[in-house]
Image (spheres, rainbow, N blue to C red):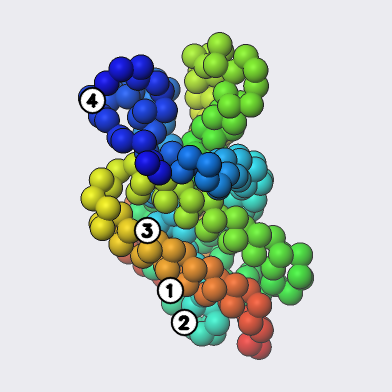
Amino acid sequence: MQNTTRTDWGRRQPPIGGSNFELYAWFFMRVSGLFLVLLAAGHMFIMHVFNDTLNLDYEFVAARWDTPYWRTFDWLLLALSILHGTNGLRIVMHDNIANKLHRSLALYSLYFVSTAFFVLGTYVLVAFVRQS
Amino acid sequence: MAYQEIVSTGSVYKGRTSMWLYLFHRITGVALFGYLLLHIISTALILAGPEIYEGAEAIYKNFYFRLGEVGLMAAVLAHAINGLRIITVDLWKKGSDYQKSLNVVALLIFIGIFVPTTYRMITSYFDICIEKSSPGTTVVDCMVRPLPDWKS
């Protein structure tokens, strides 16, 4: 090996002349991360510091979801955390699973699970109606 | 050749704090994603109505889960603050010159938020537990019993 460059180590090299997907994915992690600092840390503080999860009951959630604003907040948190987490796990899998077949299986299971949970979460947020 | 050949002669990383933070960021990230999936399921139970939702929530209301919640808070704060550190190193021109100081700053911010938060989460647990439980309940009762003796 001559002229070892830093990129010789990279496992997520884009095809030469290929797309900028990895660049956009990198940038997305920074932007979504910034939003998630507000959304996820905000959610944690609302649930665990300003309120206490011991007081969490059906009425608490129903009252929150009476306003479209909290449903929007929760949906943004759901969407961004699933996208941010899925991309993070995609990178971890690329870096740590050397076998190509195992890697493909892991990645496709990840995409399937993430899509299913995104659909489930979105359905709950849209379909919830208070039972009185 | 679409991809360059991958040649490995050992670890790329030379150790030290920032490498451990890289590993730490991945571990907390994977753990938080796992928790996210559980959290979506437990919240989805709300569609099944108050009895089922609150029955499931009751399981989470013992003190062992409170310790788990403190760990969750630690993971969220650590991942968030370390993420902000990474953004700073990436996007600030002099970020890599000050990376050692940034590690210390990130740690101090983490401690500064995590310690009072933990204090609040633990004291609030016992305050509410003793207030809501039947008379004569002690702090030790609140700590060891698997399920609270009050309804919601």
Q: Which mark is residue B10?
A: 4
Q: Does residue B42 appear anywhere in the picture?
A: no
Q: Position of residue B31 (x, y in %)?
A: 39, 49
Q: Which amino acid type is shown beneath numbered disc 3?
A: Leu
Q: Do the residues at discs 3 and 2 belong to one chain?
A: no
Element at label 3: helix
The residue depicted at 76 percent of the width and 70 percent of the height is A68
Q: Residues within 10 Å of mark 4 (few under 14, many from 20)?
A: few
Q: Is residue B126 above or below residue B17?
A: below
Q: Mark 1 near mark 2, Cβ–Cβ under 8 Å?
A: yes
User: Which of B30 and B136 lies nearest the eye of the viewer?
Assistant: B30
Q: Do the residues at discs 1 and 2 belong to one chain?
A: yes
User: Which of A65 and A122 lies nearest the eye of the viewer?
Assistant: A122
Choose mark 2 or mark 4, whichever is in front: 4
Dot 2 corresponds to which residue? B52
Q: Chain of mark 4?
A: B
The residue depicted at 76 percent of the width and 65 percent of the height is A69
Q: Residues within 10 Å of mark 1 (few under 14, many from 20)?
A: some
Q: Tell me the quarter of the picture where residue A6 sits.
A: top left
Dot 3 corresponds to which residue? A107
Q: Which amino acid type is shown beneath numbered disc 1?
A: Ala
Q: Gap between marks 3 and 4, in whole Å?
A: 25 Å
Q: Chain of mark 1?
A: B
